[in-house]
Image (cartoon, rainbow, N blue to C red):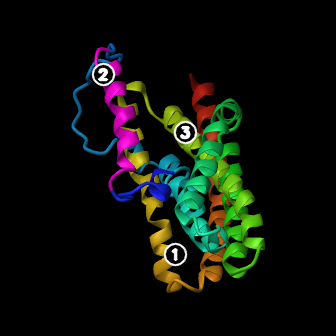
Amino acid sequence: MVAQWLPAPMVLPYVPHLIVLVPAAALVWGCADSAFELVPRTWLVPPVVWTRAFLLGVAPWAPWVFGAATTSFVTAARLASDGAGGMPIAFSGTVAAGTLLTGVLVQPPARRLGHRDAALLPVTGLVLCAVGLVLTAGVAGDDGSRGQLLLIVPVALLLGAAYGILLIAGLLAVERLVPPAELAGTVAVFYVLIYLGFAAPYVLTLLSGGTRYVPWLMGGAAVALLTVPVVVATAAVEGRRRSSADAVR
């Protein structure tokens, strides 16, 4: 709203963030540090990152976390903004809010479900991502029609849910794979991978030339679905390995 209707749209939108961040920083300044005792280590990247469980079970889909979200509120929102009644910034902000709020709301139930089956959350997130990308292709192919505005709602909900579910899936996977002393380093690597997804709108624009989005969005949906059997197979192998280790103990 600040960027759409107030002056200095490249400056004033940062002010609300500062208003929130300054008192927040003051409130957390005195919080106790509950970190584990530091453990001497010789590795720069946690060893678990080079295992099959991480390289095949987490890394292939990690960029879709923010790849899904940004495709919704950058690519899809821009494609449909012509029908936004001359308010493209407010429109894209609304799509972003719907996408990210959906991602936040699905996280508590996703965490509960994720403890039951290691593959359930990533598979669900990837399928939702693929369907959302297909609908985004519908937005791209429906240029200038009222159907774009109708499709933007399910796009935001599906890609927002994919973002939230995949984020929780990755964090739970890291918790299962590493001891507490290696948790922070491994989560950091996971975040490096998911932040690659912020490049998704740029890559889509580059590949499509800014006009031919449909084939590349459909290709992205195919890639997301092709990752599913890799995740399922890896989870099955790791499940058998853990069962064997438990039996030995």
Helix, strand or loop at label 3? It is helix
Residue 118: x, y in percent? 65, 40
> Is residue 22 in the magenta section?
yes
Residue 149: x, y in percent? 72, 67
Q: Which residue is mark 1?
A: 204
Image vertical order of residue 228 relative to residue 149, above or below: above
Counting labels gives 3
- The amino acid at mark 3 is Ala
- The amino acid at mark 2 is Ala
Among the 4 quarters of the image, the one containing residue 168: top right
Helix, strand or loop at label 1? It is helix
Q: In this rendering, which labeled residue sits more in front, label 3 or label 2? A: 2
Image vertical order of residue 58 relative to residue 155, above or below: above
Q: Which residues are magenta?
A: 11-30
Of mark 1 and mark 3, the one earlier in the sequence is: 3
Helix, strand or loop at label 2? It is helix
Do callouts 1 and 2 mark residues in contact (Cβ within 8 Å)?
no
Image quadrant where one finds the C terminus: top right
Residue positioned 66% across, 37% down in the render: 105
- The amino acid at mark 1 is Leu
Q: Which residue is mark 3?
A: 173
30 left or right, relative to 95: left
Of mark 1 and mark 2, the one earlier in the sequence is: 2
Residue 237 visible (yes or no):
no
Q: Main secondary structure of the magenta part?
A: helix
Residue 247 visible (yes or no):
yes
Q: Which residue is mark 2?
A: 26
